[in-house]
Amino acid sequence: MEQLHKGTVNDLVNYRIETAKSDLQVVGVLMKEKQYRAANNRAYYAIYHAISAVHALDGKSYKRGIRRVNDYSERAD
């Protein structure tokens, strides 16, 4: 059985940033084709991967970050 490579945090960050960039490129193509729903989906995942990259630097997860944003929004109301 093949051994999985355990990368560094920087490897993870770079992977997530590249994935976000790729998603954004697809958004451009989908917008030109007037596929707005699909473009919105890809834009969401571009943001997801970018935020996940930032959180990886701090050892945090995306879901935890979103919870904090939601908690802050509720307090502001």
Image (cartoon, grey):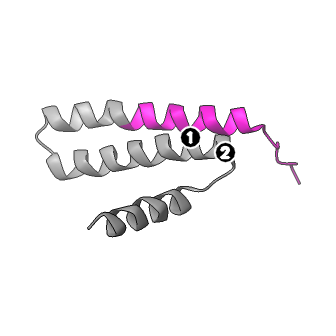
Q: Is residue 49 above or below residue 14?
A: below
Q: Secondary structure at mark 2?
A: helix
Distance between the alpha carbons at the discs numbered 1 and 2: 7 Å
**Which span is picked out in magenta?**
1-23
**Crowdedness of circle 1 by 10 Å Cα count: few (<14), some, many (20+)?**
some
- Residue at 15% x, 45% y is 35
Q: Is residue 8 above or below residue 70?
A: above
> Label 2 near label 1: C-beta < 8 Å?
yes
Mark carried by residue 54: 1
Front-most of residues 2 and 35: 35
Residue 11 locus on image (x, y percent): 70, 34
What's under tag 1, amino acid-wise?
A: Val
Q: Quick one: quadrant of the C terminus?
A: bottom left
Horizontal side of residue 70 vs 7, given as left or right? left
From the image, give the main secondary structure of the stretch colored magenta. helix
Residue 59 locus on image (x, y percent): 69, 49
Residue 19 locus on image (x, y percent): 49, 37
Residue 54 locus on image (x, y percent): 56, 40
- Judging by the rendered image, the residue that carries numbered circle 2 is 58
Q: In which image quadrant can residue 71 be found?
A: bottom left
